[in-house]
Amino acid sequence: MNKKILITGASGYVGSRIYQDLKNKNYSVTGLYNTTRLFNEIVKIDITNKEEVKKIFDSENPNIVVHLAANAHSRSCEEEPEQAYLLNVEAQSILRKWQKKKT
């Protein structure tokens, strides 16, 4: 059985390399991005939005989630701490909630 893999942050440095490597090895992989689209087939999503996360989990039904999305820019985190907390902390809880429902 071919496992379905969902990668958040598929347009980031690490995420894009993992995404491309898995695609090249013919894995069933869905990449997610929010601001920068590196590949035509990756999906734009706000992982801090519970409804958007529910929708992607319902449509893709992933077996594995590789969560690499984050705001790692210290200046932006300092200037917008609420947004940094949403992306770097709350999004993980949202993703985990839907992953648990699928397992």
Image (cartoon, rainbow, N blue to C red):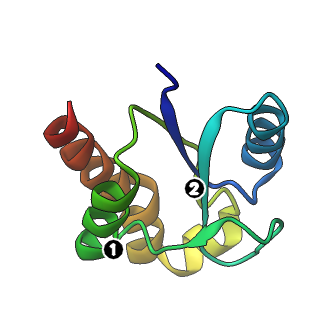
C-alpha gap between disc 2 and disc 1? 17 Å
In the image, 81 versus 14, the foreground residue is: 14
The numbered mark at residue 6 is none
Determine which residue is flagged by label 1.
Answer: 52
Q: Is residue 55 left or right of residue 10?
A: left
Q: Nearer the viewer, mark 2 or mark 1?
A: 1
Q: Amino acid at mark 2?
A: Ala
Q: Quadrant of residue 87?
A: bottom left
Residue 98 picture location, percent across and down: 22, 49
Q: Is residue 59 above or below residue 93?
A: below
Q: Is residue 28 left or right of residue 22?
A: left
> In the rendered image of this protein, does residue 83 appear above or below residue 93?
below
Residue sitting at x 85%, y 35%: 24
Identity of the residue furthest to the left in this view: 101
Image side of residue 7 versus residue 21, left or right = left
Q: Residue 54: horizontal and vertical position, in percent?
A: 25, 64
Determine which residue is flagged by label 2: 70
Residue 89, position as x, y percentages in the image: 36, 53
